[in-house]
Image: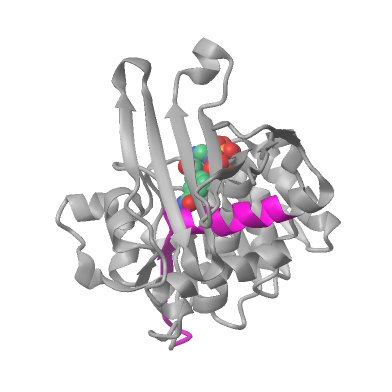
């Protein structure tokens, strides 16, 4: 019998999930990928140069979990000024693997925040030194709280150092951490954060290296989150040269991740990558083996992460009757 289609707007979704349940889900999605049990064609792009826009299409299928979805994300840089709309608009369509029906259409912003945070949490768990205590965050925008919450469930965070070009944002994130009992300091410089932390997150849209090689010390772990497109980078490529570099997916990372600029200049290639995180999550490759190593995780975001997180949101929405239901589109 035809199923009604659930519509979930952004305002229906806030706080639907607990980060403690998303981290293991994301880890499981990495395991599935590591074991070769996912289907995830490369991201496709449609370009709208006359509108300064691009659309990314991200399909993913996890047969073992019986979950599939397609995420659409547009990046239209003139939206805020010309149309009063956000630069990024993201929509996820959940597909029933059983019948092929779309069962839910949801705004993708919340899912992207939760899954991106959880990915850093999983990478921190698998790659950071076990005695890491100080978390550093550079870039305290939308991602900041998700990164903080995920990582505090994956390492024993005793202190947060945070900085942002807009100091008020760093102060707000520091204040939020303190409400969770974690002493926090909004720092004036990136140098202070990098030198003082054990685990670093970079979550800015920077297109030049903002983390210098000489600030990075032995034993650190760095989650490079911000670089999502060709030509962008956040850390000095010299850091990559002396680190254990792990990517979420070589193809995506070499085109659009932290390594894309050095790869395009011929200064870095696949031989510089230690492993893909799915192989480590699946136990096929060891994670950190030496406390003195610097580990760098380059994440570009995988469709399968959106799939598992969005289906968890849908499960809650079904249970709590969130959003609205419409008649199937195809009848
Ligand atoms: N890897 C992934 O899967 C993934 C997922 C989502 C977002 N992203 C990327 O992560 C980045 C952050 O996303 P967001 O949604 O939090 O964006 P945002 O715009 O909400 O926040 C970015 C923050 O970085 C700050 N910033 C910019 N340049 C800085 C600098 N040089 N030093 C310090 N702070 C600086 C800004 O002031 C802002 O507060 C974006 O580039 C986004 O595309 C990546």
So how many labels did they put on this image?
Answer: 0
Left-right relation of 136 to 216: right
Up/down of 270 relative to 108, above or below: below
Up/down of 2 relative to 119, above or below: above
Q: Tell me residue 184's x, y (percent).
A: 74, 57
Q: Tell me residue 162's x, y (percent).
A: 63, 52
Up/down of 2 relative to 240, above or below: above
Up/down of 329 relative to 34, above or below: above
Q: Residue furthest left?
A: 266
Q: Is residue 299 magenta?
A: yes
Front residue of 248 and 33: 33
Front residue of 148 and 97: 97
Left-right relation of 167 to 92: right
Q: Which contiguous range is marked in magenta?
A: 290-315
Residue drawn where x is 51% and y is 27% of the image: 87
Q: Is residue 173 magenta?
A: no
Q: Quadrant of the C terminus?
A: top right
Residue drawn where x is 35% and y is 42% of the image: 229
Front residue of 202 and 81: 81
Q: Tell me residue 50's x, y (percent).
A: 31, 15
Residue 97 appears in the figure: yes
Front residue of 68 and 99: 99
Residue drawn where x is 71% and y is 48% of the image: 173
Q: Quadrant of residue 267?
A: bottom left
Q: Quadrant of residue 243?
A: bottom left
């Amino acid at each position: 019998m035809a199923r009604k289609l659930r519509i979930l707007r952004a305002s229906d979704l806030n706080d639907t999930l607990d980060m403690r349940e998303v981290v293991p889900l994301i880890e499981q999605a990495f395991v599935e990928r590591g074991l070769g049990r996912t289907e995830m064609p490369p991201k496709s792009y449609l370009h709208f140069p006359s509108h300064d826009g691009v659309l990314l299409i991200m399909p993913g299928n996890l047969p073992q979990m019986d979950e599939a979805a397609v995420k659409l994300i547009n990046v239209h840089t003139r939206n805020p000024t010309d149309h009063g709309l956000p630069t990024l608009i993201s929509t996820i369509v959940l597909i029933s693997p059983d019948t092929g029906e779309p069962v839910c259409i949801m705004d993708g912003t919340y899912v992207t925040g939760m899954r991106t945070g959880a990915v850093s949490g999983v990478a921190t768990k698998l790659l950071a030194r076990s005695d890491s205590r100080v978390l550093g965050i550079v870039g305290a925008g939308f991602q900041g709280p998700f990164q903080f919450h995920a990582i505090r469930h994956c390492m024993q965070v005793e202190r947060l150092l945070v900085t942002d070009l807009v100091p008020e944002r760093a102060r707000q994130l520091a204040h939020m951490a303190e409400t969770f009992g974690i002493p926090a300091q909004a720092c004036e410089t990136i140098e202070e954060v990098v030198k003082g932390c054990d685990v670093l997150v970079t979550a800015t849209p920077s297109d030049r290296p903002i983390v210098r090689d000489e600030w990075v010390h032995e034993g650190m772990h760095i989650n490079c989150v911000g670089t999502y497109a060709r030509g962008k980078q956040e850390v000095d490529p010299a850091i990559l040269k002396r680190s254990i570099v792990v990517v979420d997916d070589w193809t995506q990372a070499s085109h659009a991740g932290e390594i894309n600029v050095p790869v395009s200049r011929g200064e870095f290639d696949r031989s510089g990558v230690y492993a893909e995180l799915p192989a480590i999550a699946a136990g096929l490759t060891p994670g950190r083996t030496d406390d003195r190593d610097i580990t760098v995780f380059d994440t570009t975001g995988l469709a399968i992460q959106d799939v598992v997180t969005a289906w968890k949101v849908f499960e809650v929405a079904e249970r709590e009757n969130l959003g609205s239901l419409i008649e199937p589109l195809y009848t």
